[in-house]
Amino acid sequence: MVEHVNRIDVGFVPEAAVSGAVLLQSEYSAYLIFNAMKPVPGSDRFEDAGRAICEFVGCTITKFGYPNDEAWFAIPRTNGLSYDVCEVTNSEWGQEITALNRHGFPSTPDFSQRHFLILFHDSSFECLANEMRPELTTEPITAILARLSERIASE
């Protein structure tokens, strides 16, 4: 099967100019924080939505950094995408992780997690997780980090 990227409508997208993405991750959880925009009803415009917090439940692996928006065109699966929240179906990365695990654990089941992809101006983020829980907030970044650090510390 061929890998395919689908946009996910979570009610917001990363801000195009300065997304300010921050990843907070432990062995058990991952949180991605970024400046978000939401669509203006009845138009093709977007307005400030505050900060997005995406919790990735059961996250097993992440990639964060390059490529940026100037390099997406070289990645066939991102053709036509912009600053978006997406899911990759038929994930080659997930299949690769399963194959690697089978070297040590031959009975590893077929890949069943979801492959999420979020595209920013200066970077991109990918992870394999069971689910994504998105939320919007107007809290300052320091308050968000303190709140999420408390969550991680109590795991």
Image (cartoon, rainbow, N blue to C red):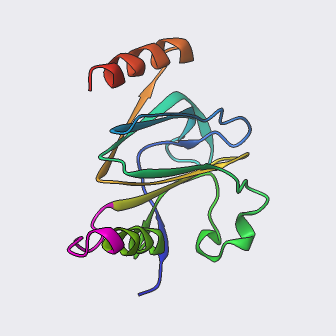
- Which residue is most to the front? 104
Q: Is residue 64 above or below residue 7?
A: above
Going by the image, does 117 lie left or right of 69? left
Of residues 98 and 24, the one nearer the viewer is: 98
Q: In this view, does 83 lie above or below 52?
A: below
Rendered residue at 40%/22% (across/down): 148
* Residue 60 within the segment the image draws in magenta: no
Q: Is residue 37 above or below residue 4?
A: above
Of residues 28 and 124, the one nearer the viewer is: 28
Rendered residue at 64%/39% (across/down): 15
Q: Is residue 134 above or below residue 123?
A: above
Q: Quadrant of the C terminus?
A: top left
Magenta residues, dominant SS class: loop
Going by the image, does 68 lie left or right of 56? right
Of residues 119 and 127, the one nearer the viewer is: 127
The percent position of residue 117, horizontal first and vertical second, equals 51, 56
Q: In which quarter of the image is the N terminus?
A: bottom left
Q: How many labels does the image show?
A: 0
Q: What stretch is highlighted in magenta?
A: 103-113
**Residue 16 placement: quadrant:** top right
